[in-house]
Image (cartoon, rainbow, N blue to C red):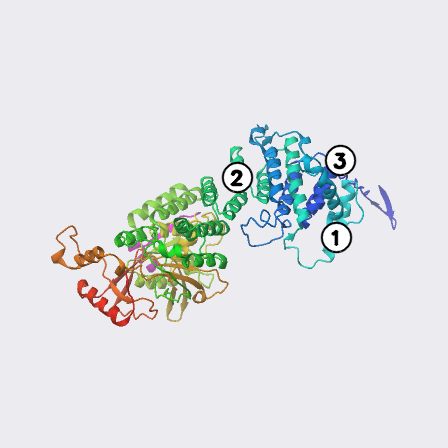
């Protein structure tokens, strides 16, 4: 179209008129259900479902998933609006099937029968062409419009429908007769709510008993309808049905829903197991609770603190000491610090009579120590040691890793040999995929020939410290400094990219001399052009089980590929940070102890509690000790064995070698130990700490002197290995 503008002919494009967007009934229904999900409006969602059925709107998997989620949430008493960012997660069966439940004992069996008819396993018909689960079910007329068995319909349905009509969205005075009309009303209410936002959106919505009952009834009706229409099931819908089973306390049904997921190639998630586990734990059924946990592990799902807390609680209440021990070690491996709630449970266990009665009176101390060494330190896994009442104290641990209550030295826990080997293999596999295979394989062969090393230096990170230009002199200062701290004084491995060696000013005599010195010492490995040197120094540090000197916090995507199983524990144990002063480099060595549950060779426990304090010295630990768990409390045969070990004249029998460890007597509970150089010397060798005592007295004479000292001081003298 042409027109004139001040005598100038210009071409003007016609504006295209946008075609009005037509909302199909299915789209409108989805919009309405999304609004209900965001606001936690379960009654509004149920009304949309009823209107959709009345209007003949075809519903898909998404519609049913939202409906079942809202119904199952309301049935348990609390609706959590979608994407509310609620933060913490807990595992609880709630009060939905307790005495206060809206589903009384009489009607509970009716719900059970209804549920069985609704999800009966024999009715499943297989999968559709896409491999999704498709189900068949009983006839729809087994249930009435509110999902109650027919014999209850007359007395309850009218009240249920009245509740629905009066409760839709909580504020609708006009009862909308169409899906479109109801959705429009919901939109207006949502706009109004947004303008009056009081910041409470992230909170769960507690529902009334009537709404609980209606939600449970309608939930099974909706599930039944889904199966009639042969809509494919997914993990979310199975989990929602399991939560509805939880509402009337049917743990077997909740667990069966999870089993059916796997049978039809649907991978269960952690949340899928929650209902069954919550019911069994709440009912005190230890055997079935641990059957759920076993099923989780068999299918690659790992319990987190809420699940382990529930297992711990049911084990404590049943007095199952072996299960308590098992869960404590599960917490040790998967939860580095426990929540205050879990800490209270643990404290409750150690104060119980069952805890005081359980434990071995005698054990092979060398076997315990060997198990601790093989496991990386900080635990042995050989069961409860000792007998008698436990002493529980809330205590911090000082900067040297000493418990301020019992004086025990906590350890820094390393990966065990199998974990280390698996970790090294996983790093090598990822590196080989991202590097030229021949390049990384050459490095592996080089490391096998010239290694092992006691430390690795990330030379690029050191040489670029606080500046843009690489300085070999800084690398040299760090290499010399860390070398003096190593037991063997051996050269550390210096990993440096090839372009740094041939870069700017590297041809200067001083820099060339440094590079030549490192090469002559077989301490330098230059990574090839196009490679990422991070893989090289990381693999070397893992393979050699040694220190890595770098300020790289290893948070980028490259290190995220390694997962969370081994990497955090390894990093805490092996990373050395550095800085520079006028006098030279300063090193911040790995922390004196790992902030993780620890079990000592005496059977004592130290449990760190989650803290928001940045200063680690202020963190509170549970210190759990008992008097009858030291070497002095073993039977006479064990004491005699110790005498044989220290007396050459008595060592000609079955025991024919000198003691591997000398024993340092120590007052139990003394937190102010004077570890002089003559008494205690700590050496680091390949990441392990070896403690040597300088006691020269005969052990046999020490025992009698200690017994006399105990009688004189009315105290117990403990042994520290």
**The image quarter in which residue 439 lies:** top left
Horizontal placement of 170 versus 584: left or right?
A: right
State which quarter of the image contains the N terminus. top right
Label 1 near label 2: C-beta < 8 Å? no
Between marks 2 and 1, how big is the CA–CA gap?
A: 43 Å
Q: Nearer the viewer, residue 713 or 370?
A: 713
Between marks 2 and 3, how big is the CA–CA gap?
A: 35 Å
**Residue that carries the numbered disc 3 in the rendered image:** 54
Residue 342 place in picture, x, y as percent:
48, 56
**Residue that carries the numbered disc 2 in the rendered image:** 252
Q: Decide which of tag 1 and tag 3 comes sooner along the chain.
A: 3
**Residue that carries the numbered disc 1 in the rendered image:** 191
Q: Decide which of tag 2 and tag 1 comes sooner along the chain.
A: 1
Secondary structure state at the residue bearing disc 2 = helix
Residue 33 place in picture, x, y as percent:
69, 43
Residue 380 place in picture, x, y as percent:
33, 52
Q: Is residue 142 magenta?
A: no
Q: Is residue 286 above or below residue 344?
A: above
Instruction: Give the mark toward the camera: 2 or 1.
Output: 2
């Amino acid at each position: 179209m042409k027109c004139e503008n001040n005598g100038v002919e210009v071409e003007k494009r016609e504006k295209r008129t946008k075609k009005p967007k037509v909302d199909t009934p299915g789209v409108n229904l989805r919009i309405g259900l999304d609004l209900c999900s965001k606001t936690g409006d379960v009654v509004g969602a149920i009304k949309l479902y009823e209107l959709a059925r009345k209007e003949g709107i075809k519903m898909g998997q998404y519609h049913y998933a939202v409906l079942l989620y809202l119904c199952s949430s309301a049935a348990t008493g609390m609706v959590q609006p979608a994407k509310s960012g609620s933060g913490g997660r807990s595992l609880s069966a709630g009060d939905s099937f307790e005495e206060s439940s809206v589903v009384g004992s009489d009607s509970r069996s009716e719900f059970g029968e209804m549920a069985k008819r609704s999800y009966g396993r024999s009715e499943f018909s297989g999968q559709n062409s896409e491999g999704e689960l498709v189900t068949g079910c009983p006839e729809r007329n087994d249930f009435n419009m509110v999902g109650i068995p027919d014999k209850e319909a007359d007395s309850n349905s009218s009240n249920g429908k009245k509740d629905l009509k009066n409760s839709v969205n909580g504020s609708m005075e006009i009862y909308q007769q169409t899906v479109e009309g109801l959705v429009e009303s919901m939109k207006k209410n949502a706009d109004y709510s947004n303008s009056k936002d009081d910041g409470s959106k992230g909170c769960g919505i507690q529902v009334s008993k009537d709404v609980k009952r209606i939600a449970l009834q309608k939930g099974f009706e909706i599930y039944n309808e889904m199966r009639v229409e042969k809509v494919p099931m997914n993990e979310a819908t199975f989990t929602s049905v399991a939560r509805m089973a939880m509402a009337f306390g049917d743990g077997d049904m909740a667990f069966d829903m999870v089993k059916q997921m796997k049978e039809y190639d649907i991978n269960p998630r952690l949340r899928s197991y929650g209902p069954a586990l919550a019911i069994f734990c709440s009912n005190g059924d230890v055997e079935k609770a641990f059957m759920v946990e076993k099923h989780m592990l068999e299918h690659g799902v790992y319990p987190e603190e809420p699940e382990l807390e529930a297992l711990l609680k049911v084990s404590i209440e049943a007095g199952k000491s072996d299960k308590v021990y098992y869960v404590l070690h599960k917490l040790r491996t998967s939860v580095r610090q426990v929540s205050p709630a879990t800490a209270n449970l643990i404290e409750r266990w150690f104060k119980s009579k069952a805890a005081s009665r359980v434990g071995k009176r005698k054990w092979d101390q060398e076997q315990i120590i060997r198990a601790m060494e093989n496991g990386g330190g900080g635990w042995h896994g050989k069961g409860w040691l000792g007998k008698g009442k436990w002493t529980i104290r809330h205590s911090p641990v000082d900067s040297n890793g000493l418990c301020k209550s019992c004086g025990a030295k906590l350890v820094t826990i390393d990966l065990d040999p199998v974990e280390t080997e698996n970790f090294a293999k996983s790093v090598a596999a990822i590196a080989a995929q991202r590097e030229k295979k021949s390049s990384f394989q050459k490095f592996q062969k080089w490391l096998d020939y010239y290694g092992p090393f006691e430390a690795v230096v990330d030379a690029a990170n050191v040489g670029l410290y606080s500046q843009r230009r690489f300085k070999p002199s800084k690398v040299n200062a760090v290499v010399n400094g860390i070398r003096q701290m190593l037991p063997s004084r051996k050269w550390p491995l210096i990993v440096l990219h090839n372009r740094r060696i041939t870069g700017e000013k590297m041809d200067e005599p001083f820099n060339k001399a440094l590079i030549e010195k490192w090469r002559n010492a077989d301490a330098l490995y230059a990574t090839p052009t196009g490679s990422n040197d991070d893989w090289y120094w990381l693999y070397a540090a893992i393979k050699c089980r040694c220190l890595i000197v770098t300020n790289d916090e290893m948070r980028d995507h490259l290190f995220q590929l390694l997962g969370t199983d081994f990497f955090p524990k390894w990093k805490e144990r092996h990373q050395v940070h550095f800085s520079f002063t006028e006098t030279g480099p300063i090193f911040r060595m790995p922390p004196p102890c790992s902030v993780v549950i620890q079990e000592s060779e005496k059977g004592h426990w130290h449990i760190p509690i989650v803290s928001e304090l940045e200063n680690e010295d202020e963190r509170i630990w549970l210190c759990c000790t008992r008097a009858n768990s030291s070497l002095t409390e073993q039977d006479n045969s064990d004491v005699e064995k110790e005498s044989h070990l220290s007396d050459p004249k008595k060592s000609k029998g079955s025991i024919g070698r000198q003691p591997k460890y000398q024993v340092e007597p120590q007052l139990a509970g003394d937190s102010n130990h004077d570890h002089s150089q003559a008494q205690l010397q700590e050496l680091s060798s390949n990441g392990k700490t070896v403690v040597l005592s300088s006691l020269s007295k005969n052990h046999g004479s020490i025992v009698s002197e200690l017994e006399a000292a105990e009688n004189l001081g009315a105290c117990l003298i403990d042994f520290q290995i």
